[in-house]
Structures are given as structure tokens and as C-alpha cells.
Image (cartoon, grey):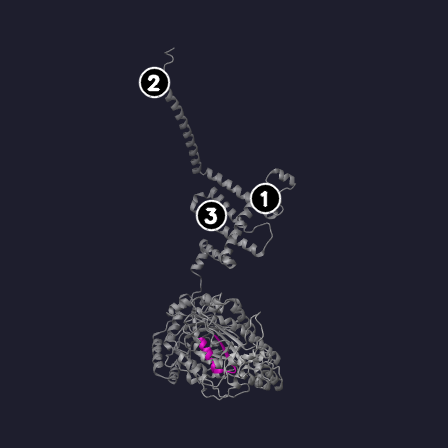
Amino acid sequence: MADNNKKAPRGANKSTTSKKKNSGGSLFKRLHRGTGTISKKIMDNMRNGRLTIVFGFLIGFLTISSLLAMTSFLWTGGQDQNLINAAMDAEGLEVSGQKARNALGIIGARWADTLFNDLFGWGTFLLMGFLLYLTYFLLWHHRKGGLHLLKVFVQMGFWTVWTSIFAASLQKLFSSDSYLLWGGEQGDMLVRSIQRNFDTLGLVVVLIVSLLVGLILMSDRVFAAVKEPRLPDVDAIPRPKKEWLERLAFWKRLDEESNHEEADEALEEITEHPAQQPSYTEPNHLAEEVEEKPVATPINRSVPPTPTRSVESPSGLIIEEAPKDDLIEVAHRPEHLAPGLQYEHYHRPSIEMLREHEQGAKAQSVDEIEYNKQRIIDTLASFKMRVTPYKATIGPTVTLYEVIPDQGIKVSRIKTMEDDIAMGLKSEGVRIIAPMPGKGTVGIEVPNSTPQTVSMRTILASRRYNDLLDEMALPIGIGKTITNEPFVFDLAKMPHMLIAGATGQGKSVGLNAMITSLLYSRRPEELKFVLVDPKMLEFSVYAPLERHFMAKLPDAQDAIITDMSKVVPTLNSLCVEMDNRYRLLTQAKVRNIKEYNAQVKANINVALHQGELMPYIVLIVDEFADLIMTSGKEVEQPIARLAQKARAAGIHMVIATQRPSTDVITGLIKANFPARIAFKVFSMVDSRTILDSPGANQLVGRGDMLFYQGKEMVRIQCAFLDTPETEQIVGHICAQEGPAAAYQLPEYVPEGEEGGKSFDPNQKDSLFDEVARLVVNSQVGSTSNIQRKFNIGYNRAGRLMDQLEGAGIVSPPDGSKPREVYIKDIASLEHLLEQLR
């Protein structure tokens, strides 16, 4: 027994353990061999294509079933909506008692709703198209490679997403109540995201740009059409021959040494040899137009334009040289003192106070014009756009080249060549007018190498400006057009003007030119200014004109407003003045200030207007953006009210700003300021803000500007006058006879602050009794009348009038109308004065 309980020998234990290990290892080996066999079979099936065909059939079956379900869903989905939204269990279907109308039953209806409405809508059909192509690829075309399949997947994915966004946008546009989501939930989500970040216009831009990019990347035909557009072949542009170069040198020498008569004789000698003319000629109908029709001008058709001198260059280009200034002597022009003009000894400033700034300026030479013309032709020809040169018009700052495009050349293509032509000419500010209004040509404005300065003297002394003085209420000569003619407009017909331009481009000089033009054309009885100068420097030179030409509030110390807190009360006071003037116009039974002043000059309704003219009031704001920043809506509201109504009352506004952004020039301001002047700006956005079109960003600066009044834009070189000239004009006016004080605007009393004038007999003025007797005897309660009769200042005269009102002698103020005198006889007045003592 003891032996039996002994352990087994070591050898027996080892053999048993090894058997167990061997049995476990053999199982692992068998599993490994089985797995390897399966993997090998799978790899074999993949190599021989059997597994690929199976996957192809499965994907094809799923795709065709999905297409069948989706197609049936388009017609039956509305009827299956209750079943689609019901519970998935069979009991719910049986209880409902309904049967799915989809071709694949309730499962097909729900599957189609998921594919169409939850994914990409109509774009899902393109996704199904890719799955069909994938089926074809796996069954019969798999040897082409995985990269090809990836390319097709990217293309179809792009069109799926684009179609989904486009369909969702259309559904939002037409607001359909269908159970179908045209773009699916994914398309709706993308549309909302794009609109939230880029607005509706941005959504349209994204769709158009992505469509163009997709077509270029995926279509070789579109790519080839964009890269190399098919245009009709054109012949090479003929180059000037050697003899023509010699003739150009002859013209240059002739331009430097001879006068106009010798140039005419040289032209006659050249035209005697017709065989040497260039190979192209201008069309006959355009040549007849030049001979028969004068140069059109937007200023005044009744005044004939100054004839220009046209010559023909050796290459056949018509060159219109700048005409000589048609000046008249206006230094000592006699003035007829009509009724209503009070100051008999007032004389307007003389033209001799202004200087000729353009003397000694060199005109554009013929050879430079020929060179620029040829560079324009060559630049356009390099882009397969052939044109025929027609005419060159020399202006003070730019030269206008007119060309005629050949048959089949789109004008819109030439319009886009501004930068290329500027590079070819090595110039800046090239502006293309395509087409020229009223002509069959395309205009190209090129800056002159030596621009001329237009002086204010030549504008104010021109025959055009002086002939229009009696026809226009507020004539303004601002500068010269591209045809070198003075540009004159009537501010009263604008009726308000908006001026914008970058810093240092001539905006302040333009305002000074407008003020000077009005000072030369109107007398103190006819015109008053309200000047707002936030910079406190631009209008300070006009401060001495307070008596003659300024209007201000009764309590204002300075006529020129530099304190921004005074701007809003002044604007509100102008609104009160406008309302008071409308009452006077209604009582006089006239429609505007022009008819009212005509009654004054004809001595009609003398008791109503006391024989005094109603002066025009011109409000000029130098920097409107600063007002908007400091006061905001408080400034915009009275300005908009004046802009809408003040025209007939003779109140006009000129607003200037160097920041033409939409937060400064709002839609309300733009709608009521139809006349615009744009100096050079540095972006197309600013140009569109002020002019509603590009162009101001192509100007050359230094007074170069565009004038726009709802029709075509006119390019003008602004007239220049320096500070010594302005000081001399102001000094001359201050020395003339004029009013005793500035024109007083009515006092603006805000709502809730109305109240009568109090009177203390112990504090009455020493002249109170005499003034009261004057008022009662004349039955005229006027502050200006008291000023003139007693030779006192306005402040004292105003206090006396307040005391008369407090004592009950005169009525409260009623705008610009004289106060009513309550006491009608001198005996009643003496009794009242005795009581006040």
C-alpha cells in the first residue's frame, strides 16, 4: 500500500504532461490552418473576381430597389405619410387598417423617405447614379483601377451636393408645401448656413461660381473654350511706314516753331498728295457728323458752344484742339438796382482779383497723341480686338480718344481693358466709356503728361457764365469739361448736392470754387450762407462776410459753425425758417421763392413782404461724416426734411464728405440728393456708393472729378483759386455797403420749452420809450428796422423787441413775418408808458 501511494516516476509525469501539451498545440495548429485556408479561399475569390461580382450584384440590387422605391415615392409618398410616421410594429399597421401604396410596401416607403427627404433630395438620384456606375465597375470594368473610381465618386458627389443646394434654394424661392424636400434636410442645412453667413446674394454667387469651377474642372470642352476662346481671325494691324515717321517729326517741329496759320498751310500741302494717305479711313457717316453737328453740352443748349479747332493728323486721326477762352470784360459792369435791392452802393467783386493760373502751361503735342493712339490700338489688337481710331479731344487734364470697334467685337470686352491699356501707356487713371452716349464710338480717357491748371478767372470771365447769370437763380461755374468748355450749372435746379472724395483730391477747393462763384453772381439781399466747418479751418477765411452773406441763430457768436453742438439747433432753425417761408408763399399765392421775389420787384403785395426780397439760403457742410459720428440721427432727420421740402422755399444744401460709406451716405440721404460730384476715391465700392457706378476710382486726382445728375456722367477739371485770391475777394466785399448784422434765423424752441417773454419795468432799456413810439407810429415791429433807425447792434435790438413783447406792445415772433403791433395810436402808448414808470 505504501508503494502504491508513492508518486509516479518522473518519466511518467513528463510523458503525461507532454501529451497534454501536444494535444493543445495540435488544436491551435488546426484552427490556424483552418483560418489560413479560409483567408486563402477569400483571396483566391478576390483574385479571380468572384467576390467582386457578388458585391456588384448586391450593390446593384440595392440600388435598383432604392430607385424603384424613390420613383414610386414621388407619386405615392403623400398618401403614405401616415404610415411612414406610424410605429414600426405590425400591430400598429394592422390597427390603422391602411396599406402602403409604395411599390415596395411600407419598407420601401420609409426607405425612400429616408433617402430623399433625409439626405439630398433630387441630388440623391445622382448618388444612385454613382451606385449604378459602381455596379458596372465591379461587374465588368474593375480592371480600370481605383483612382478612376475615386475620380467618378468626387465628380458625382460634387453634383449631388450642388443639385441639393440648388433644389433647396428653388423650394425656398417658390415656397412649396409639398411633402417632398427638394434638397433634402442636408441641402436645407447647407442653404441656411450659406444665407446666414453670406445672405441671399452670396448664395447666388456661391452657386454660380461653384458651377463654373465644376464645369472647368470636369469638362475638357469648357476648359478649352475658356482657355482659348474662338474668335474670328484678324489681319495684322498696319504699322506706320518710314515716311509717316518723318511726317510726325515734321509735325513736332511745326508745332514748336509755327503758329496756327502755318499749320493750316502745311495741312494743305499734305492733302495735295492723296496717294500717301494711310491704309484706313474713318467711316463717312462719322465724318459727316463731325462737320454738321456741334459738340453737345449739358449746360445750356441756348448758348452756342465755343467752336473748336479740328485738324487731321498724318495718320488720319481727327484732333480737336482746346478752343481759346471766350472772355468778356466784366470788371466794371453796371448793375440795375431793381426794387427790393437796398444797397445802392454795393459793387460785386472784380475779375481782376483773380489770377491766370494756367498761363505758360504746355499743350499736348501731336506726336504724343499719335503715340498714345498707336499704343491703344496695339494693346487691343494683342487681345484680338481690332479698332479704328477716329478722333482725339484734348482737355485740360485728360485726352479723350474715340475708336470704332470692328464688326463682331463686343463693346463689353473693350470695357474690361482699362488696366491693360493703362499698363501699355504707362499711365494711371485710364477710363473707358463704352459706348459714347449718342455716338457709335468707344471713348478712352487718358491723362495728359502735362496737365493744365484751370483758373477760376477764366470761368467767371467766360461768356457762357455771364450769359447765364440772369437765367439761373444760383449759377455756379465749377470748372472745364473735357472739351475745354466752362461747365456752369444752377444749384437751385439740382436742388441739393452731395460731394465726396478722398483726402487731398480737391474737395475743399471745389467748395471754395462754388462759394466764390455765388459771391460773384449774387448780392447780399439775394443770398445767405450757413457754413458748417467741423475742421475749423476751411471756411475761416469767410468769417468777415458775416454782415453781408451769413445767416446764423440769434444767440450765436460766430456765423461759421465749428461747434458740433450748434449744428442740430441750426438745422432745426432752418426747418422753422422753411415752414415760415411756406406760410408767406401761401399768403402771397405763389408757388416758389422765384415768383415771390418777382412780386417784390414788381411792387406787388408790398404790405405782405415790406418790399424786401426773400434771400436764398445755401447750407454747406464740409465734413458730413463727422456730424454723423457725433450726432447721428439728430442730424440726419432735419437734413432729410430740408432735402424733401426746402427747394421751393429757396433753401439748398451742399454736403461734402471724405468717407463715402453707407453708414454716412445712407439711402435716405442719397434719395434726396440727386446731384453728385465725385473726386478721386481709392476703391470701386466708394465710387458705387457716391455715383451708383464705378469711375471715380479711375480719376487722376488734383481736382479731376465726375459730375452726375441722373444722366450721363461729365468729367470736369475743377477750377483752382488760392487763399490770397479768396482773402482779396472777402476784403472787397467787407468794404462795401451792406446789412448791419447777419441774417437772423428764427429761434428754435424744443417741444415742452415754450413760454412767453417776461418784462421787468425796472430793467427796461434806456431807448425803450423811443423805440416803442417808433414802432407804434410806423406800425412795424421789426428788429432790423430798430437796428437801422437807432444804429445799434442786433443783440440790443433783440432785447428791446423782447421787452416790447413783454409789455404787450407787439406780438410774439411769427417766423420771418413782421410782428403785429397791438397798440394802434400814440395816446394809448403814452398811457401805457406812464403806467410802466
Residue 288 versus residue 638: which sits nearer the camera?
A: 638
State the SS at label 1.
Answer: helix
**As drawn, is 52 to the left or to the right of 602?**
left
Residue topped by disc 1: 109
State the SS at label 3.
Answer: helix
Q: Position of residue 106 (x, y in %)?
A: 60, 42
Name the image quarter holding the N terminus.
top left
User: At label 2, which amino acid type do we have?
Assistant: Gly
Q: Nearer the viewer, mark 3 or mark 2?
A: 2
State the SS at label 2.
Answer: helix
- Which tag, 3 or 1, sits closer to the chain's start? 1
Say few, some or many: other residues with alpha carbon within 10 Å of mark 1 (under 14 / 14 to 19 / 20 or more). Answer: many
Residue topped by disc 2: 11
Q: Position of residue 154 (x, y in %)?
A: 46, 49
Q: Nearer the viewer, mark 3 or mark 1?
A: 1
The residue sitting at 56% across, 50% down in the picture is: 181
Does 514 appear in magenta?
Answer: yes
- Which tag, 1 or 2, sits closer to the chain's start? 2
Q: Which residues are magenta?
A: 510-531
User: At label 3, which amino acid type do we have?
Assistant: Phe
CA–CA distance in space, label 3 to label 1:
27 Å
Residue 60 versus residue 204: which sits nearer the camera?
A: 204
Residue topped by disc 3: 153
Q: Position of residue 56 (x, y in %)?
A: 49, 41
